[in-house]
Image: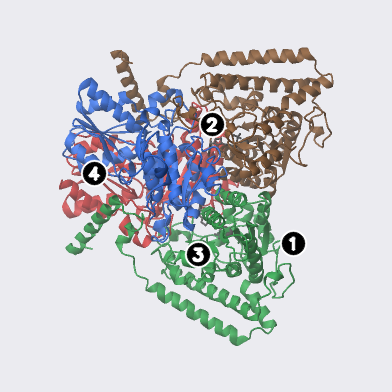
Chain colours: A blue, B red, C brown, D green
Amino acid sequence: MAAPVKSKIDESTSALQKLTIGKALNLGLRAAMEADDKVIILGEDVGKLGGVFRITDGLQKDFGEQRVLDTPLAESGIIGTAVGLAVRGFRPVCEIQFEGFIFPGFDQISSQLAKLHYRTQGRIKVPVVVRVPFGGGIGAVEHHSESPESLFAHIAGLKVVSCSNPADAYWMIQQAIASDDPVLFFEPKRLYHNGQLRSEVDTSSPVGPLFASRVVRQGTDATLVAYGPSVKVCLDAAVAASNDEGRSLEVIDLRTISPLDLGPVFESVRRTGRLIAVTEAPSESSITSEIAARVQQECFYSLEAPVLRVTGFDTPYPPSKLEEHYLPDLDRVLHAVDRSLGW
Amino acid sequence: MAAPVKSKIDESTSALQKLTIGKALNLGLRAAMEADDKVIILGEDVGKLGGVFRITDGLQKDFGEQRVLDTPLAESGIIGTAVGLAVRGFRPVCEIQFEGFIFPGFDQISSQLAKLHYRTQGRIKVPVVVRVPFGGGIGAVEHHSESPESLFAHIAGLKVVSCSNPADAYWMIQQAIASDDPVLFFEPKRLYHNGQLRSEVDTSSPVGPLFASRVVRQGTDATLVAYGPSVKVCLDAAVAASNDEGRSLEVIDLRTISPLDLGPVFESVRRTGRLIAVTEAPSESSITSEIAARVQQECFYSLEAPVLRVTGFDTPYPPSKLEEHYLPDLDRVLHAVDRSLGW
Amino acid sequence: MSSPEQWTHPEPGEGPAAQAAQPSPEQVIAGLRATTEGGAELTQLLTPEGERIASQFDRYVTDIDGDALRGLYRDMVLVRRADREANAMQRQGQLGIWVPLLGQEAAQVGSGRALAKQDMAFPSYREHGVAFTRGVDLRELIGIFRCTDHGGWDFAKHRFHPYTIVIGNQVLNATGYAMGQKFEGKVGDDDGEATIVYFGDGATSQGDVHEGFVWSAVYDAPLVFFCQNNQWAISEPTERQSRLPLYQRARGYGFPGIRVDGNDVLACLAVTRWALEECRHGNGPVLIEAFTYRMDAHTTTDDPTRYRLSDELEAWKLKDPIERVRAFLARGGHADQSFFDQIQAEADKFAAELREYTFNLPEPPPERVFSNVYAEPSPVLDAQREEYLAYLDGFATAGEH
Amino acid sequence: MSSPEQWTHPEPGEGPAAQAAQPSPEQVIAGLRATTEGGAELTQLLTPEGERIASQFDRYVTDIDGDALRGLYRDMVLVRRADREANAMQRQGQLGIWVPLLGQEAAQVGSGRALAKQDMAFPSYREHGVAFTRGVDLRELIGIFRCTDHGGWDFAKHRFHPYTIVIGNQVLNATGYAMGQKFEGKVGDDDGEATIVYFGDGATSQGDVHEGFVWSAVYDAPLVFFCQNNQWAISEPTERQSRLPLYQRARGYGFPGIRVDGNDVLACLAVTRWALEECRHGNGPVLIEAFTYRMDAHTTTDDPTRYRLSDELEAWKLKDPIERVRAFLARGGHADQSFFDQIQAEADKFAAELREYTFNLPEPPPERVFSNVYAEPSPVLDAQREEYLAYLDGFATAGEH
Ligand SMILES: Cc1ncc(C[n+]2csc(CCOP(=O)(O)OP(=O)(O)O)c2C)c(N)n1
Ligand SMILES: Cc1ncc(C[n+]2csc(CCOP(=O)(O)OP(=O)(O)O)c2C)c(N)n1
Ligand SMILES: [Mg+2]
Ligand SMILES: [Mg+2]
């Protein structure tokens, strides 16, 4: 396994940089490409354009057209050739332009990417990363605001993660690339260039292991668990609850969606007795269902209220003029906290 | 909406017929085709061969090549053209040869089939049925034994059902075809030609509505909930528990996977205090997760033990020499009952 | 303003700045290639200078007299004017996004006007010009871009299917529809039905487009594949999708493929009429590659200066689809200045109405989130709606929202 | 015995019985068409009667002397013998299923022997003959069909990828692999590397195969697409997939396509060597359609009497791939009866060893269910394994299991 080695970036600049999530991902990709020349990027418009979100900005210029590939317009092709490149010894990083366009690549993901290691009893590794900008709140048209991550969590053989802040973005993408397993990497697109989240990233040492959840705010009255863009919503809700009502909410950033790392959640629920799981995805047969199912089993005697869920509804993503109703926001989270506390 | 009208089949033969699930499906399809000449079947090898499981046996011969189409070998093509045929006013019934081959059609299912009605504010209906033989236990090679139904339950806009016995097979397929919504119809392939299940089917009147769960065995000590092939496993377990240990297990056949009809489950759990959900699919982010999540919420004060799950493992389907370990069987179900009762 | 960070509402100064494109030598060559006439095989009836030239397809436009040509001119001017208005409205924050058709008016109006009433059309997402020819009021289309709905017209009445954004997958839906026309016995004579499906050069790489080719060939579906090769799939030139001119793709499937000058409305009309006639009579499918150019950005979120040279645009301006009709009309005495002025005035009014309508478009009510997920009732969803509306009501009562 | 209900372990008398096929007129015609020589474009070096005929591809087999030809003969006889043995073992309940290659020995041995050591091969699921030429011990392959594993050979060492059952999707994986060969600079001279990918006539309809064509053309990947057109995709004749001969599909992508007599091992060898050489030198990709015939059922679960006439099979028997080499060897004095007897004996021994091995194949242990899901540890899965093994242990202790 190729561990992320110290990158040129660190040497040329200070180890502490103020970054947005988008810029952190860009630098993380650059660091991974510098560290290992088997890392290649492929996707639609990732070259000169730098991707529609500019996450790959400047990489083709510096690493050339054989390491940053503007591919034909076909997602099955992107994933399917990445699998073949991985068999050959490359570490491909695929960009799916928007999560709504991952579905033409679904078969390659579920039949090859997820299973090749198992099918071959470990003889073939497929260290492919599939980067997927996901989630809503950007006022977009159809297919540009969905949250399909639960589908991949249900498919054994895949690892699924999501970052919520610049430091994680910088390090998790490098760790995902260094991982010998296929990783679906969900990026909170509406936060890419959010200046509020801009923060100092220590580019000299990682923030912890990739497949681990993390308590991002401590609290005692109830626990909120979320990932990706919903982490910010939960943190904002926790601040509001503290300011307005003196309530102390614990917030856990899941970070790893599959495999789930629920240890910190169980531990927290044993203290608070209450859990609210938050996601933009529809609730039915989702990650939040899984969290509820496992928490009710592991913390049966600790729960003082059922696990509640604040999610997108079980509808297709609505026209975006309506998305404020669809997306869990601070108010809906706090409403669920009220319900939990009032149980 | 085209309601299933009385079929020629009923007139020519007795209303009570002893049928296997496979034969019941075949007759159900025939009845639907007789009732409405907009019903057409499309899939690989569904014509002369009658499908690899013979579920469409004889239909092309009787209804012609324009109503039973041997299609080119491409699942996206099957679903995608079915959507177009539905827009034109047909009621297409697609056969996917084995569930493991539905994935190339995933994009058409999630982007068009599931969403067209919503996208058009109800102006366009897509009454397409996708028949999917699913599940393991047939000693097959890769991709022939999976249970991907949870993926479709997570996609809003689809309805997902599964039958477990000949009478349901006969009627549910007709009801699915008559439904104006897209329905994924999961068929328990290992039971198709199982003679033990052969039973009398009243072809003169339906067994109840399509999207409804049903208590198939009453009991008082604990509740088992399952669908498709696992219903038989649960019923067998209930008989064994009764015979061997005098335990009274209630068994609920879910029948409708999405939308879930959990009313009968809640009602049952309020009486028994214990629930075990059984499926061949991996557990993570699955229908059983959803059942557990909703039951712990709705029956919080009634549960005397956490909802337990007996499922396939979170691995790809193993080589079938190992499938007896992978598939929930009577012993694993009873073991879970023991754990629940001992909580 | 055309920066991509639009998508994510950046704060000023956020995100990487657009840089001047640094074209590679290949890109320069590609750009040059793209501005040739499209090769020897290109069907053209009207040159960029507005000269009418003879073609084997002349017999498909014998009815196009001065009147009809003025009609096509009007169509194109109105459509372009509306396009520019919508683009401006997006810049003013009134639309979430706009997908400009600038430069593709002839391809769309020519092919759209070739359709008979009974024909069906499946668009991609840029076919506002085709929508217009199908009698769709562009006001019924603007909600897509104001993000209030996903398309508001009567699809069955106009025989114009909803827009599809997922690249290529409408091609299979159109194939199924056309198969249905065939199965219903609506193919075989002059009154036969046919279907047309629109997609781009980039779309040709998608598996679904191939499967559409396979199926329609095998089932003899009455389907015209209308590929607008506007030279770009966002930032990728057509060379990223194919070694050969795209119309030649048909060769491998056993049905005809033809390249037409997509900036020549008359040629587009003629060739599409021919193709539809083939389909009507049961000789479908047919592939048409309309060789044209996307004169604006991919969408209002795109910044083409990053990937293409302005020289290319300048070269294509000389082939403007509207100007050549104007030149032909003027030179042949089919129209005078007052006609052009009148059309311009009509177009301005048309655009103003679109703007007015857009500004007044009501916000959809929250319950719309839950509507029409299914054709039949869903108790689970009903419960979610009730719960959410009650929750909203709580705010209203508390006066907090 | 070849009934499909095998899949679902029917009780005797269960399920619909196989009926004699009632061929439609079109099917009769199709059947006849399929038994012609594959059209004027067919490349052949050895006629069904065993006559060597001149071809432009002769220069690719100048090294194939009597010795080498006897080697190819031996390959085919051994492979066929193993195939028949495995088929018989399935009938005896020793294999879950078998996928016969009967009739396709020349296509597989000819193309497989054309590969250089450094080349890579991506099979579908019927390529036992190719596996053999790559040095894979067929015993390492039998576990797939005994359902103990998904393929046991050393993929990197043999440069022979795992079998893929999902139709067509290995084509994209092979494309990626070949792109990798190119990116690593392994293409350009006589020692260059190339990749070959196998798929069937039915597979050509899949989107993934198209995308493989597009990508390999755009990236000049050193990839030979080797389509074994065995006339059938289970019950569907090739006419269900295409209007045109399949090798012509390449025309639309801008790379060469060629049809070779798939029952002529010399022609398959020559044409594949040519194609690989093109790839090695950077002129890939190339499509080869090997025109052959599936002489047995699709798999042991299939019942071809339902959909095809035995006449068709009889006609193809006259073109048997092994018989024509035997005739050539005998007629030219390259081999005598003792050679043929010796090969037969060797083949019998080969088959007996396969049988013996199969019967003794150990059952995989239960923990294998959980092994190698991931390359790196997964605590969730570790817990599931521990729990399940403890549960099993419970039975062992209780003596119940
Ligand atoms: C399946 C899919 N992948 C990616 C996208 C994102 N995307 C939108 S338009 C576009 C380029 C399309 O190019 P082309 O087919 O040439 O049509 P044009 O926009 O030029 O009309 C891309 C990549 C998408 N909408 N759908
Ligand atoms: C995606 C997919 N769909 C369906 C199947 C079931 N299936 C297995 S083999 C086969 C026919 C394949 O025909 P062809 O490509 O001609 O190959 P052949 O078996 O003749 O070698 C089908 C439909 C599959 N394996 N994968
Ligand atoms: Mg384009
Ligand atoms: Mg075949």
Q: Tell me whether marks 3 and 2 sit on the same chain.
A: no
Given this view, does label 2 or label 4 mark the residue nearer the observer?
A: 2
Estimate the x, y position of residue C20 in percent, counting from the top left: 58, 33
Chain identity of mark 2: C
Given this view, does label 1 or label 3 mark the residue nearer the observer?
A: 3
> What whole-number distance in Å separates the C-alpha atoms at marks 4 and 1?
69 Å
* Residue at x 28% of width, y 26% of height: A237
How many marks on residues? 4
Chain identity of mark 4: A
Please tell me the numbered disc located at residue D160: 3
Please tell me the numbered disc located at residue A263: 4
User: Which residue was labeled with disc 1?
Assistant: D40
Estimate the x, y position of residue B311 in percent, counting from the top left: 30, 49
> What whole-number distance in Å separates the C-alpha atoms at marks 3 and 4?
42 Å
Amino acid type of the residue that numbered disc 3 sits on in the rendered structure: Phe
Q: Residues within 10 Å of mark 2 (few under 14, many from 20)?
A: some
Q: Residues within 10 Å of mark 4 (few under 14, many from 20)?
A: some
Please tell me the numbered disc located at residue C18: 2
* Residue at x 56% of width, y 62% of height: D305
Q: Is mark 4 within 8 Å of ligand 1?
A: no
> What whole-number distance in Å separates the C-alpha atoms at marks 3 and 2?
47 Å
* Residue at x 43% of width, y 57% of height: B142
Amino acid type of the residue that numbered disc 4 sits on in the rendered structure: Gly
Q: Residue B144 is drawn in which quadrant?
A: bottom left
Residue nearer the viewer, B211 or B319: B319
| Secondary structure at numbered mark 1 | loop
Amino acid type of the residue that numbered disc 1 sits on in the rendered structure: Ala
Q: Tell me whether marks 2 and 4 sit on the same chain.
A: no
Q: Residues within 10 Å of mark 3 (few under 14, many from 20)?
A: many
